Amino acid sequence: MALLGGVIKKAINFNGFISRETNPYKAQKTVLLQLLKKAKFTAIGLKYKFSDILESADPVKAFQQNVPVYDYDAIYDEWWHYLLQGHQNITWPGGQKYFALSSGTTSNKKSIPVTGDMLNAIKKSGIQQIMSLKNFDLPTDFFEKDILMLGSTTNLIEAIDHSEGEISGISAANIPAWFNKFYKPGPEIASISNWDEKVKRISEEAPGWDIGSISGIPSWVELMLKEIIAHNNLNTIHDIWPNLHVYTSGGVAFEPYRKSMEKLLARPLIYMDTYLASEGYLATQKRPDTNAMALIVNNGIFFEFVPFVEDNIDEEGRVKPGVPVLTLEQAAENTEYVLLISTVSGAWRYMIGDTVIITDKKRSEIQISGRTKHYLNVVGEQLSVQKMNRGIQKLEHHFDIEIKEFVAATVFENEEFKMKWVIGTDKEIDTTKAAEVIDTELCDNNKNYAVARTKALKGVDVEAVPVEQFYNWSEEYKKLGGQAKIPRVMKEDAFNEFRNYVLQAVV
């Protein structure tokens, strides 16, 4: 088996050596032309004259001038609902075999088409991630160890002419045959829908596996590791998985979970971020000396960037018509943008709901900074999740605590506006002081917030609850495990309902 590991590692190094650095701007133009050419005879391609766009002197500019920006609700209402009814050739050639379901943080429920071309693109992007392992210092025998992928159930919902499930479950149900040798927890356990039952089975089988890497959303991976350790009476997970070297994170920022997760380990892991959304595999970390991810610029997704400023976004968090939209080549580093994608699943100029910052244009590297609807601007405070995370980090440092979950809202109470926070921590803290720490940090680093605090925003309140209450709420109102994410920002009515629920354990 050691020989196999050596062969795989040499193959990765060789492929990494011979593959030339892709010019990201040329690659992106090529991708757009490929998308337009393949979809020119679909319903959307005929409406917006993709054939004419392809013949124009500047196809990228013509594409941006002729095709509108869509959010999920707009593209579903105009186009994608026909796919669920069984129609073909709507936004991508052919019919529809899969839909990725998402509880969504930008819409209550989403059904995202996942075409065969998208599944192939996801597989190719996964290979790009594997190839990037040559940049990390890993032992040869790592390449023969098992890979634990904690995702949603592969037991998909069967409709008349298609299957539905979360993207992680759809992807796992379509893994290449050669990968089954390394894949854990295996098809049987992966098909279990109930979170508690799935984790129980994983805990029972775990001692028989030789795991080298784990992938999944941090909150659910941490809960799984705790259960495995408790069930098998371990000190750390390395007691049974001594060859565990890599954790591939996705879905949410990993940093809030680092301290608590590393308590479950005998040694830190190599942490790699990925950007696998219901709409596609957008980016992956390719080198060790950064926490940024490289956009996958040559594999079925065309990216556009809208400056994330108040003039460009309406009160519902949508891109306004006619605002500036930039290509990767035109966009600037260290500026926050709303991300748009056009894909081989038939998303066109689609507002995925995330905001990103380009950290390195040459490498096409980005960081996810927040969500367009996870953005507080009720009274001019203009707070992105990235800025809120900084306030939470300051709070963690001040009280020497871990805060893995939080929800914030600006509410109208007693004839004035206040910003309210519910934070998840298992330690008692002075919540009045906590509010002061967060307020000071936000005032010092966000001039719009500082101005709002002198005018309409009259105060800041913080309440602390056990972090388990966040997960209990998720299980009851969203679902536990899989791709489920707890929103960082809520509107007033939703926040009040959430707050009432999680405070039940405190009263």
Image (tube, rainbow, N blue to C red):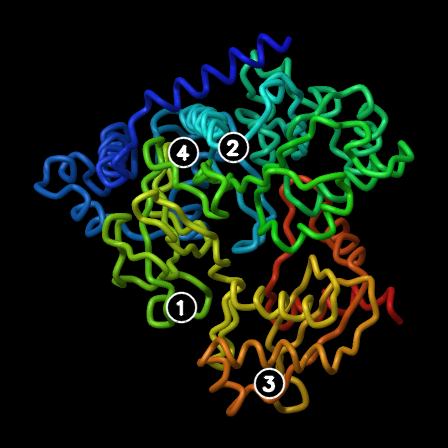
Q: Position of residue 221 (x, y in %)?
A: 71, 40
Q: Position of residue 39 (x, y in %)?
A: 28, 31
In this image, 67 relative to 358: left or right? left
Pointer 1 with pointer 3, Cβ within 8 A = no
Residue at image x 45%, y 44%?
293
Mark 2 Cα shell of 10 Å, populated few (<14), some (14-19), many (≥20)? few
Element assignment for label 4: loop
Disc with the residue nearer the chain's start (3 vs 2): 2
Mark 1 Cα shell of 10 Å, populated few (<14), some (14-19), many (≥20)? few
Q: Where is 67 relative to 199, above or below?
A: below
Disc with the residue nearer the chain's start (4 vs 2): 2
Residue type pointed to by label 1? Asp
Pointer 4 with pointer 1, Cβ within 8 A = no
Mark 4 Cα shell of 10 Å, populated few (<14), some (14-19), many (≥20)? many
Disc with the residue nearer the chain's start (1 vs 3): 1
Q: Where is 368 relative to 399, above or below?
A: above
State the CA–CA distance, disc 4 to disc 2. 32 Å
Q: Mark 3 sits on what residue?
A: 417
Q: Mark 4 sits on what residue?
A: 345
Locate residue 198: give its quadrant.
top right
State the CA–CA distance, disc 4 to disc 3. 43 Å
Residue type pointed to by label 4? Ser
